């Protein structure tokens, strides 16, 4: 059908102009992977992300998202992922994947944390969704009768599954969608439409015998290949989890304060990927290696000012400072003790005080222990007292 052919080429071109380096079309038809998804939920791997349990019918049948839906245009927009070598001044080799997250700083260097590459710019949801809407307008110029809805992690949609069916990439053993030419550092978006577009071929798995991502995950978050137990993933622990981070996982989290890129950093398909056309999304490079002690002292207003429009807003100040305290503990530098002590005395949020106590215990040494004992005498919150006791006992 020549009309659809012309339309699809023009759409592809327009998508590229709008910053989408990946484009494909999948049928708006029931998804077999919904069974895999339902099992994943039943096993409890979603943790506190209760919203993932809702609207199973729409996840299984994307055609329910729009009456008369026929096609799903799947789009990928790359973001620049800083390799560990760019943030830590050395080139990682195959054998040093375990040391890419948290080297100890030299004494004249600030104590720095790590933030996932996708979070170095403005919140991607708004930008990617508005570009997808512009693409829908182009589609509607050619097919005025076509209806469409755009999604970017904004509705119950199995985005990786649809992306695989549209040929954008395969779901790797690390569960990310990977494109053979372009790696996995891209956001996904979908336009569900009534337009009858030609479908692409699904992508094929190229993981082979490789297990680098599974071996490199510091928190053992993969119970098996292609399956993530989100409750153990640093990305979940630092972004989605409300309340305390399980003590048993804290020391494996390195210096990550928002998200984690390790299982993508070690993936050969990212190392081989040529620099894709990348949307800058107002990237702030200084966020790649944030000054941990500065962040720990942010008040509410400072937090709002620093992270306006930024995805970190999601954790609120309380969650971010909780993560920062854990990272400081893991960096393990005694220079942090005076500031940790001040925060333990003055911070109003018990969640933050509890994690600061953990950090002092993890750094250890006579000074940190003395400060913990002193705080024990004045602390009134029972949860924080438990954290202080555990920190003193070293558990
Ligand atoms: C919940 C969620 C998370 C959770 C859980 C992640 C997970 N692996 O499930 C947490 C908070 C941990 C997370 C982390 C990250 N996330 Co996230 N997340 C989502 C979200 C909202 C839902 C994912 C989901 O449904 N998970 C449940 C599992 C079961 O589904 P799935 O991994 O998508 O796998 C599907 C298919 O691949 C297929 N499948 C996979 N394996 C197998 C095996 C068999 C046998 C079969 C039949 C099918 C099958 O079926 C599954 C169900 O559809 C999506 C947006 C969306 N609506 O899809 C973004 C999304 C997946 N996240 C994204 C990103 C960028 C990330 C991070 C890279 C951010 C970071 N740097 O910290 C990390 C990556 C961690 C990782 N290794 O996955 C991108 C992924 C882009 C890409 N190239 O893959 C998405 C698509 C958001 C977006 N619109 O761009 N995320
Ligand atoms: S994002 Fe980090 S913690 Fe999560 S699975 Fe990948 S390596 Fe493990
Ligand atoms: S690191 Fe290896 S196993 Fe993991 S996703 Fe990449 S290719 Fe697949």
Image (tube, helix red, strand yellow):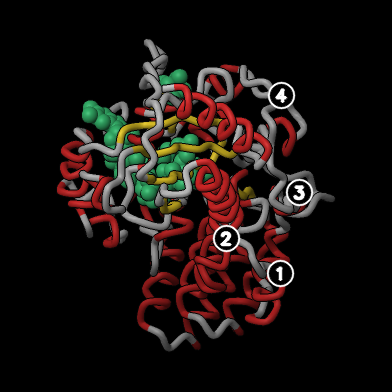
- Does dot 4 land on a helix, a strand or a loop? loop
Q: Residue furthest right?
A: 108
Q: Say if disc 4 is inside 8 Å of ligand 3.
A: no
Q: How many marks?
A: 4
Q: Position of residue 60 (x, y in %)?
A: 21, 44
Is the residue at mark 1 in contact range of ligand 1, meaning its CB lies under 8 Å from it? no
In this rendering, the label closer to the viewer, 4 or 1: 1
- Near-viewer residue (307 or 351): 307
* The quarter of the picture showing ligand 1: top left
Tell me which numbered mark, 4 or 1, is placed earlier along the sequence: 4
Residue 115 in percent (x, y) is at: 61, 49
Q: Is residue 109 visible?
A: yes
Which mark is nearer the camera, 3 or 2? 2
What whole-number distance in Å separates the C-alpha atoms at marks 3 and 2? 15 Å
Q: Quadrant of residue 200?
A: top left
- Where does residue 356 sit, x and y in percent of width and height? 54, 68
At a point 68% along the width and 66% down the height, the residue shown is: 295
Q: Which disc is residue 176 wearing?
A: none
Q: Nearer the viewer, residue 247 or 222?
A: 222
Q: Is residue 265 above or below residue 371?
A: above
| Pointer 1 with pointer 2, Cβ within 8 A | no
The residue under label 1 is: 306
Task: Residue under label 4, please give it.
Answer: 91
Of 341 and 35, which appears nearest the observer? 35
Residue 117 position (above or below residue 164): below
Residue behind mark 2: 311
**In the rendered image, which residue does mark 3 sit on?**
285
């Amino acid at each position: 059908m020549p009309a659809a052919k012309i339309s699809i080429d023009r759409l592809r071109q327009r998508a590229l102009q709008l910053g989408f380096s990946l484009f494909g079309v999948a049928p708006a038809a029931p998804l077999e992977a919904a069974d895999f998804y339902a099992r994943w939920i039943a096993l409890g791997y979603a943790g506190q992300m209760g919203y993932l349990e809702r609207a199973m019918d729409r996840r299984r049948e994307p055609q329910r998202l729009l009456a008369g839906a026929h096609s799903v245009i799947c789009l990928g927009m790359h973001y620049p992922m800083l390799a560990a070598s760019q943030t830590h001044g050395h080139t990682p080799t195959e054998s040093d994947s375990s040391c890419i997250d948290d080297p100890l700083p030299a004494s004249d260097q600030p104590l720095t944390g790590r933030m996932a590459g996708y979070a170095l710019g403005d919140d991607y949801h708004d930008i990617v969704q508005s570009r997808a809407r512009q693409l829908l307008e182009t589609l509607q110029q050619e097919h005025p009768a076509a209806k469409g809805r755009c999604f970017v992690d904004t509705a119950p949609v199995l985005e990786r599954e649809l992306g695989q069916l549209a040929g954008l990439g395969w779901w790797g053993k690390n569960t990310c969608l990977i494109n053979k030419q372009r790696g996995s550092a891209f956001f996904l978006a979908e336009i569900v439409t009534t337009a009858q577009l030609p479908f692409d071929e699904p992508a094929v798995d190229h993981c082979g015998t490789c297990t680098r991502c599974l071996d490199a995950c510091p928190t053992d978050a993969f119970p098996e290949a292609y399956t993530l137990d989100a409750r153990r993933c640093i990305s979940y622990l630092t972004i989605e989890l409300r309340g305390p981070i399980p003590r048993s996982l804290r020391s494996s989290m390195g210096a990550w304060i928002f998200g984690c890129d390790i299982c993508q950093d070690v993936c050969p398909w990212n190392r081989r990927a040529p620099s894709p056309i990348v949307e800058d999304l107002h990237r702030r490079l200084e966020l790649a290696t944030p000054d941990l002690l500065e962040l720990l002292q942010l008040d509410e207003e400072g937090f709002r000012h620093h992270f306006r429009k930024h995805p970190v807003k999601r954790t609120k100040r309380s969650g971010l400072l909780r993560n920062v305290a854990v990272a400081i503990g893991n960096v393990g530098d005694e220079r942090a003790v005076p500031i940790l002590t001040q925060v333990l005395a003055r911070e109003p949020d018990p969640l933050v005080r509890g994690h600061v106590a953990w950090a002092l215990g993890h750094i250890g040494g006579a000074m940190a222990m003395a400060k913990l004992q002193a705080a024990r005498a004045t602390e009134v919150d029972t949860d924080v007292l438990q954290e202080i006791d555990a920190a003193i006992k070293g558990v």
